[in-house]
Amino acid sequence: MKITKLSCDLVDVPFDKPIRTAVHDIRGIGCVLVTLESDQGLAGEGYLFTLNGARLAAYHEMVESLADFYVGKDPYFAEGHWQAVFQATNFMGHKGPVIAALSALDTACWDLVGKALERPLHRVFGACRDRIPTYASGGLWLSMTPDECAEQAQGYVAQGFTAVKLRIGSKRIEDDVLRARVVRDAIGPDVGLMVDANQSLTVKHAIRLARALEEFDLIWFEEPVPYHDLSGHAEIRSAIPMPLASGETEYTRYGMRDMIQARSADILMPDLQRIGGLTEFRRAGALAAAFDIPVSSHIFTEHSLCVAASLPNCMSVEHMPWTAPILSEPMELVDGCLVVPERHGTGFCFDPAAIERYRIG
């Protein structure tokens, strides 16, 4: 089998209502949808995205510039193609658009392999489960009032979620404590609660806040300070009563390695786009496992399921519904877990009608 063509579609997917974290104002996402076609009539799909579609053209150009590493090649050599791109882009650096483009191409390549084998990818990789715990992450934004958060959190529990994530990062510690209190009261003691500061705090503020939040029995405290401040993460981690989760902004297994060496997190959070696609996600997960560190995937819920279901140390996937409007198949939530689809490849395909609806230009 040979890859015969690379094609891209650019789409803009608006949110029903703008949202805000401590560092972002988000109206929607712009995506580069990547398709690799083969001489057997099969197609593999992957994508990358930017918040509000900012600088999407740069990502599109980077994907197109890497076409020669895949077109005309055998998709079964996915890891070889990954390494070839990595070596060829050394001068440009291995962060940002280079890795994002490689991630989308790598995921599309593996999707094509799964379809050719007529197997779901978690079985190709070596499955360890057929469902994975998840948590509701598409709400409880900092732009919402405490009462709105409480109401939405109850709605998530009614839908079947057994854990929810609350965004924090207010200027006053008392305001974040209030947000956590009303959400905990709304969901009760048996539903898991995480908080995410979105890299917005100082070390001292984060430590004070985490100690003030101890009574709410948090599963984790996520990204308290800027991602590049590994020593700050390590200082916070050693001083707070709950696990610290981070890593979504790190690139490739080498970023995960640096975090492990710095002892900067209890839970690592690979992001499929930044980590380097399915190939590198598997490597990063294995690296974390060598140090008995759990991982939990960041965004890219649908396309992360196959690798999460083949990593024994993957504790959960983030349930983020942002790309649901452009995919043909919905996610299936059962007893607080997402069911890993038995469909071929990643198990999710772009919806042609949605592509036309959201197409840019």
Image (spheres, grey):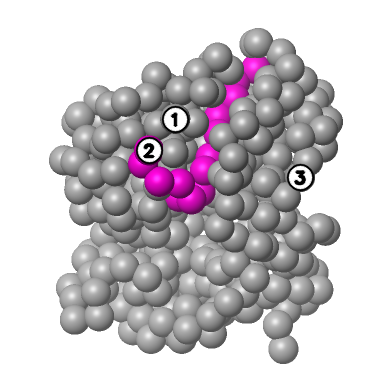
Q: Is residue 201 magenta?
A: yes
Is 41 included in the stretch rendered in magenta? no
Q: Disc 2 designates what residue? A: 204
Tell me: residue 305, above or below residue 338.
Answer: below
**Inter-mark Cα distance, 1 to 2:** 6 Å
State the residue position of label 3.
Answer: 144
The earlier-in-sequence mark between 3 and 2 is 3
In this view, the residue in front, 292 or 88, is 292
* x and y percentages locating residue 241 in the rendered image: 39, 19
Residue bearing mark 1: 208
Q: Position of residue 158 (x, y in %)?
A: 81, 24
| Residue 134 seen in the figure | no
How many circles with numbers are drawn on the protein? 3
Amino acid on which disc 1 is placed:
Arg
Mark 3–mark 2 CB contact (< 8 Å):
no
Asked if the residue at tag 1 contacts the one at tag 3, i.e. Cβ–Cβ closer than 8 Å, the answer is: no
Q: Residues within 10 Å of mark 1 (few under 14, many from 20)?
A: some
Residue 98 appears in the figure: yes
Q: CA distance from mark 3 to mark 2?
A: 25 Å
Amino acid type at circle 3 is Met
- Which label sits in the foreground, 3 or 2? 2
Horizontal side of residue 44 vs 334, given as left or right: left
| Range shown magenta | 191-204
Q: Alpha carbon of mark 3 to alpha carbon of mark 1: how far?
A: 23 Å
Query: Closer to the observer: label 3 or label 1?
Result: 1
Does 336 appear above or below 47? above
